[in-house]
Image: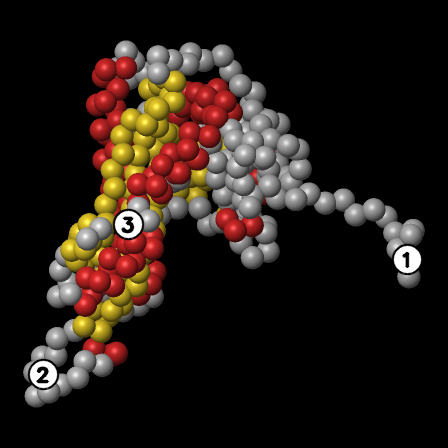
Amino acid sequence: MTSTAHAARMRFHVDGWDPTYGSSVENAENTIGDSTAKVIPDLELAPADWKPISPSHVPDPGAVLFVDGVRRVEARIWIEQPAAEPAPNAINRADDAQMALCASYAAGTVCCCPDRGAHLLTIESRRGLFTTATNAVDVPTTAGTYQANITFDDQEENLAVLLSTALQRRLGDLEILVAASARTALAGHGVAAGSDLLVVDGPLRGRTHLPRAVGLIKSHRTAYLPPDLHAMVSALAAGERTPVFLMGTSWDRHAWYLRLPCTPGAPWAGIVRLECAADIPAPEAIALANLSQLVLPRYASCEYKDARAPQNLVPVAGLERELRRRLGNPALLSRALRVAAVS
C-alpha cells in the first residue's frame, strides 16, 4: 500500500463553467458519447491530411450580429377539462384537468460595428400559455396576456417535454424574427449590404435559410467525428480550428470545431462547434469558417467575469442579461397569474 507521503501527486483540471450550468461536456460521465451521425470529412482536407488550421488573413465583416433568446416558466397551471355530459352538481377532480405552462420568452440582437461599437439592435418579448388542452384560451393578467399555444397531444411523449419543446419552438421563431429585422435595421449603420456576419447562439436548425449565418454550440454531448479525427479536437491551440466537414443527423449542416482563447486546462476547454447551412457550396462554408476564426476569439469571455467562459461570448452574455430583465419580475408575474386564476 502506498503511503500518502509517497503517493504521486494527482494532476487535475477544474472545468471553468459554473456547476449550476452543468459542464461544457454534457453527460453523466462527463465524457463525450458516440454518435450515429453521417460525416463527410474530406470537404476541406482529406482525412489523412487533417491538421489544426491556423487563422488566415480575411477581411473583417462590416458588422457582427449576435442573436440569442431566453425563456422562463412562470407557472405550471392545470386547465380543467369539460365533461362530455356533466353530472348535476359535479365537482371538478384532478384527473379532469391538464397541466400547462405559462412562460415568458424574449429574443434580441446585439450589433458590433465600427461606427457604433456594441449596441442592442432589436429585441422582442412574448408571454405564452403552452398546453394540449383544446379548450385553452388566452390568459389576460395585469402583467400582460399569456397567448394560448395549443399543441397536439402526443400520448407517446412525456407531457412536460412536449410543452417545453413547444415553448422552444416559439422562441426559435422569435429569434428568426429578430435576426431578419436586425438586418433591415443595419441599413442606417453605414454597413455595406451583404458584409455582415450573423452569429446564432445555439444550433442553426430551423434557421439555415438565413444568409451568412453560423450557429455556435457551447457544450458537447456527442463525438460526431471518427475517433482519429475526434482526437485532434483536444489538440487545437487557441485560435485554431478543425477542417470543415459535412454532418448529417436529423438534419444536415457544415460544421467545424474552434478553440477560443482560455486558460489551459481540461482537454476541451474553450472548444466550440460552429455550423452553417449544408446547401451552400463547400468553398463558401470554408470562408465562413475562416471568418468565424477571425471574429469570435475577439469576443471570448474571461473566467473571472463569466461562469461559462470563454464559450459564452461577451455580447451574448450582455444580451442575455437584458433579455432576462425584459421578461419582468418573476414574483410579480406569478402573483398576477394567481390573481387571474381566481378572477
Say which element carries label 1: loop
Which circle's residue, 2 or 1, is located before the other in the chain? 1
Visible residue check, residue 245: no
Which circle's residue, 3 or 2, is located before the other in the chain? 2
The reply, left or right, for residue 47 in relation to residue 292 is right
Residues under labels 1 and 3: Cα distance?
57 Å
Task: Check disc 3 and report the residue beneath it.
Answer: 104
Residues under labels 3 and 2: Cα distance?
34 Å
Q: Which of these two is toward me, 333 or 265?
A: 333
Q: Amino acid at mark 3?
A: Ser
The percent coordinates of residue 260 (x first, y second) are 55, 29
Q: Residue at x 35, y 12 (%)?
A: 115
Residues under labels 2 and 1: Cα distance?
76 Å
Q: Amino acid at mark 2?
A: Pro
Q: Residue at x 25, y 24 (%)?
A: 183
The percent coordinates of residue 134 (x first, y second) are 14, 65
Q: Residue at x 51, y 44 (%)?
A: 220
Task: Check disc 2 and report the residue beneath it.
Answer: 86
The reply, left or right, for residue 31 in relation to residue 279 is right
The percent coordinates of residue 217 (x first, y second) are 45, 39
Crowdedness of circle 1 by 10 Å Cα count: few (<14), some, many (20+)? few
Residue 2 is marked as: 1
Contact, CB < 8 Å: mark 3 with mark 2?
no
